[in-house]
Image (cartoon, rainbow, N blue to C red):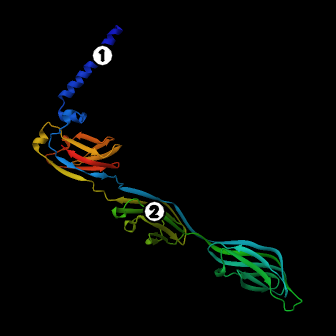
Amino acid sequence: MDKRGYAVSAPIVAVGIGILILTYLYFLPLNDKCNLIPGLPSCEQSSAETLFSANPGILVPQEVSKRYSIPSTELFRINDLELATIFNEIKVERGWFYSNAGDAEFSLNEGAKEAKLFIVIGDAKGSLNVVVNGRTVSRISGEGVREVNIPIGITEKTNSLKLVPTVPFMPWSSNRYGIAKVTLKERYTKTTNKATYNIEIKQDPNDVVRGMLNFNSECLSTDNLIVTLNDNELIDDIVCSGMKRDIKEYLKKNNTMTFMTEGNYIINSAYLDITIKDNVWPTYYFDISSSRLKSNVPIMLNLYFNETGSKELSVYLNGISISAQTSKMDWKTTINKFLVERQNSIMFVPRTDVTISKAEVK
């Protein structure tokens, strides 16, 4: 076929398609035309009766549910024993007019239950005072290994130790000690038996209809697990398989949750699920007569906004959702097919922050 035939036939086909589209649109019912092209002059019913008009104002979307995660926690209490060397090979001596004492510092772990000094003496004359934090806790004498208890009540995290002989009876003599070694034996409780977490909820506590606390737990002892929220006790029991409980009655905007035990527990997969009551969105009612509904005149929903920018909301007409999205100052659509004779309802549910200055049906 001649290539010029193709060149001539292409415009003819395009014109034919255009004529078919125009013919289709011409015979299309006005309501359907306005659904396809709301801006048609024939869709503007400025003289039509206004069926509904309202000013919904500012609408803000609201989360109906929210999950707040709580970190995994290991709670344990372990009795332990630790040895530390304080002195090695020292000599101390004291006369009437001089003193050569042994001074040192030592530390105790937090939670110490017992502390003892073991003093290995190789050479001894007279008595030896053992002074901790300025207080004489023992007076010992003689060679060998001597055991001295340190009262926990006088100790701190860092402590001073002083070994000083007593004053001799005669002014020309002295008391002296050759000490091979001084060690500290400490029995303490190593604990991480309490964990506290702050949970700030974004929802209004007064709107909460359910607050489910959920966690898994593994008990490694027969001790109770205590869980509190804002100083309210949620449980005090052996909890080996987790817990699930509605705690909405204790919830505040800022919450303090604490896990405690005298034993050993592993807590994981902990979270707080907040559910709030559905917001009551603006709902309006209007009537339509049978004659208006059956006419071929399109009924338009017009929304007017206070600003440009992306806006999204759902419009529920008699429970049927219509999605409205625009960045313009207004939005419109025909709504004939959603309406019923007599009373109709319309509700606006935002998906973004939006201000509807005016809504009307006409």
**At label 2, which amino acid type do we have?**
Ile
| Spot occupied by residue 244 in the image (x, y as percentages of width and height) | 41, 64
Which residue shows up at 85% across the image and 86% down it?
Answer: 97
Q: Secondary structure at mark 1?
A: helix
The residue that mark 2 highlights is 199
| Spot occupied by residue 89 in the image (x, y as percentages of width and height) | 83, 74
**At label 1, which amino acid type do we have?**
Pro
Q: Nearer the viewer, residue 216 or 165?
A: 165
Which residue shows up at 18% across the image and 40% down it?
Answer: 299
Single out the residue that lies furthest toward the bottom: 169
- Compared across the picture, whether 333 is left or right of 276 comes to left
Judge depth for marks 1 and 2 and give the one in front.
1
In this view, 96 is above or below 251: below
**Count of numbered badges drawn on the protein:** 2
- Compared across the picture, whether 124 is left or right of 271 comes to right
Marks 1/2 in contact by CB < 8 Å: the verdict is no
Viewport quadrant of the C terminus: top left
Which residue shows up at 23% across the image and 43% down it?
Answer: 302
In this view, 33 is above or below 267: above
- Compared across the picture, whether 200 is left or right of 149 comes to left
Q: Nearer the viewer, residue 39 or 246?
A: 39
Q: Nearer the viewer, residue 221 or 117?
A: 117
The residue that mark 1 highlights is 11
Which residue shows up at 26% across the image and 21% down it?
Answer: 17
User: Earlier along the polypeptide chain: callout 1 or callout 2?
Assistant: 1
Packing grade of label 2 (10 A; few <14, some 14-19, many >=20) is: some
| Spot occupied by residue 208 in the image (x, y as percentages of width and height) | 35, 62
Q: Secondary structure at mark 2?
A: strand
